[in-house]
Image (tube, rainbow, N blue to C red):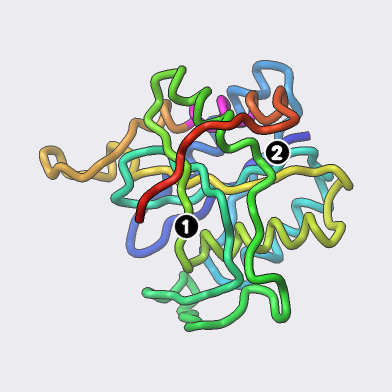
């Protein structure tokens, strides 16, 4: 079983490409014979974790990919690390705005993704999809759920060998005013990107050595 999650709209938007892409990718993968569940998460600190953990218990997946919107980024971002810090620049959809709070009290400072992010990067580039390995998932609800996912898997929620991680997607093309220059990708491209990552993760037991770091 594969679990894909995306978020509801936030910040005044009427759509969230993370959910659009996750839902569409689940259809692509189901058409290829995979068992897939797609779950929409609330863009709310704490509540999003409860919904995710319920999905982990119900579906007992072998692979979990959570997806979020990173408006302004030009590429699919394969997130490498989640940090134990909530520091919200804007309120979430319930009006919460934690500042310098731990995602999990007393938890480790950080968790690394257990997805083969370098192999996925290589596969995305081969498919002609713009992608990068990102060293930060921010400090908003995306990082919150990424950290919570990895903490949940490390503490036994889900199947024993479950792997998981987080992907940020850009704005969807229809969100961006024509001619604005704001980076975006079409929804079908983002859905296929998620499917590529899933296929790569299922076929890859150890990641490849590939330079994908940054200077700053």
Image spot of residue 51 (x, y percent): 69, 60
In terms of image quadrants, where is residue 151? bottom right
Q: Locate the C terminus by quadrant.
A: bottom left
Query: Looking at this view, is 144 or 176 the one in front?
Result: 144
Q: What residue appears at the point 49 percent right and 51 percent down from the top-left corner?
A: 68
Residue 196 is inside the magenta segment: yes
Left or right: residue 51 compared with residue 23: right
Image spot of residue 179 (x, y percent): 11, 39
- Observer-side mark, 1 or 2, equals 1
Residue 24 is inside the magenta segment: no
Image spot of residue 104 (x, y percent): 69, 75
Instruction: List the residue tagged with mark 1.
Output: 136
Which label was assigned to residue 37?
2
Q: Residue 204, can we see it?
A: yes
Position of residue 54 relative to residue 76, above or below, is below
Image spot of residue 198 (x, y percent): 63, 30
Left or right: residue 191 compared with residue 38: left
Left or right: residue 173 compared with residue 54: left
Q: How many marks?
A: 2
Q: Locate the N terminus by quadrant.
A: top right
Circle nearer the N terminus (1, 2) = 2
Q: What residue appears at the point 59 percent right and 56 percent down from the top-left corner?
A: 41
Q: Which residues are magenta?
A: 191-198
Q: Residue 192, can we see it?
A: no
In terms of image quadrants, where is residue 32? top right
Q: What residue appears at the point 34 percent right and 57 percent down from the top-left corner?
A: 13
Most common SS among magenta residues: helix
Q: Secondary structure at mark 1?
A: loop
């Amino acid at each position: 079983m594969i679990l894909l999650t995306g978020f509801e709209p936030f910040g005044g938007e009427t759509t969230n490409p993370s959910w659009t892409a996750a839902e569409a990718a689940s259809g692509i993968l189901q058409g290829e014979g995979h068992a897939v569940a797609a779950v929409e998460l609330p863009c709310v600190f704490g509540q999003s974790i409860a919904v995710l953990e319920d999905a982990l218990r119900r579906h007992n997946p072998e692979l979990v990919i959570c997806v979020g919107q990173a408006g302004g980024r030009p590429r699919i971002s394969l997130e490498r690390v989640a940090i134990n810090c909530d520091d919200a620049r804007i309120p979430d959809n319930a009006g919460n705005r934690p500042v310098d709070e731990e995602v999990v009290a007393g938890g480790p400072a950080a968790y690394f993704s257990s997805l083969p992010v370098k192999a996925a990067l290589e596969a995305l580039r081969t498919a002609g999809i713009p992608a990068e390995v990102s060293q930060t998932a921010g400090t908003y609800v995306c990082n919150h759920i990424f950290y919570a996912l990895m903490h949940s898997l490390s503490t036994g929620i889900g199947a024993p060998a479950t792997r998981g991680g987080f992907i940020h997607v850009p704005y969807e093309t229809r969100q961006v005013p024509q001619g604005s220059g704001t980076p975006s990708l079409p929804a079908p491209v983002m859905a296929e990107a998620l499917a590529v990552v899933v296929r790569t993760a299922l076929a890859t037991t150890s990641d490849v050595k590939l330079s994908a770091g940054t200077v700053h």
